[in-house]
Image (cartoon, rainbow, N blue to C red):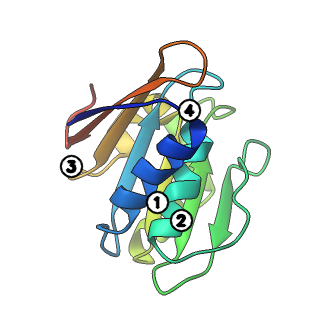
Amino acid sequence: MIVTTNSETETVLEGERLGGSLVPGAVVALEGGLGAGKTAFVRGLAAGLGIDNAITSPTFNIVNEYPGNIPLFHFDMYRIESEDELFDVGWDDYLDRKGVCAVEWSEKIPTALPQDTIFVKIDSLGGNKRRLEISLGVSS
């Protein structure tokens, strides 16, 4: 599915739409350059899951946890040098906890992602306009 958004608010709303359809154990892999809107999309995922916490990028923590009926585990792989580092922070444990894992910079950990991962590629089209490509199980 390809969607074009014209504002950050619309990008958040698309994340919320997806978040409302997610089940425990889902993994959402986000791809896109700096400032593409990955964190805005994750704010929407959180809203769709019924989480009303302030969502911030976990760049320096690697993962932020947000409690809810279905918890959200928000990962940022920007500073990860290898998939081994991901497993050192307990990736397998997070997958087993049956929350939703949202993974920014997921292209850095391709073999760690489950087969049924939902991929969201976000491209900036200039200004606040974004192209979102959402697919199941295949990196775009």
Is residue 95 shown to the viewer in this render?
Answer: yes
State the quadrant of the C terminus.
Answer: top left
Looking at marks 1 and 2 on the same chain, the residue that comes earlier in the sequence is marked by: 2
Looking at marks 4 and 3 on the same chain, the residue that comes earlier in the sequence is marked by: 4
Looking at marks 3 and 1 on the same chain, the residue that comes earlier in the sequence is marked by: 1
Residue at the far right in the pictured view:
60
Name the amino acid type tagged 2.
Ala
The answer to whether 94 appears left or right of 134 in the picture is right
In the rendering, at what x and y percent does residue 56 appear? 73, 52
Residue highlighted by disc 1: 101
Residue positioned 34% across, 70% down in the render: 25
Residue positioned 38% across, 45% down in the render: 112
Residue highlighted by disc 4: 82
Asked whether the residues under the numbered discs 2 and 3 touch, taking CB atoms below 8 Å apart as contact, a structural biologist would say: no
Q: Distance between the residues labelled 4 and 1?
A: 18 Å
Q: How far apart are marks 3 and 1 (CA)?
A: 14 Å
In the rendering, at what x and y percent does residue 65 appear? 65, 68
Q: Is mark 3 on a helix, strand or loop?
A: loop
**Mark 4, residues whose alpha carbon is within 10 Å: few (<14), some, or many (≥20)?**
few
The answer to whether 5 appears left or right of 116 in the picture is right
Name the amino acid type tagged 1.
Cys
Residue highlighted by disc 2: 46
Residue positioned 43% across, 66% down in the render: 100
Closer to viewer: mark 3 or mark 1:
1
**Mark 1, residues whose alpha carbon is within 10 Å: few (<14), some, or many (≥20)?**
many
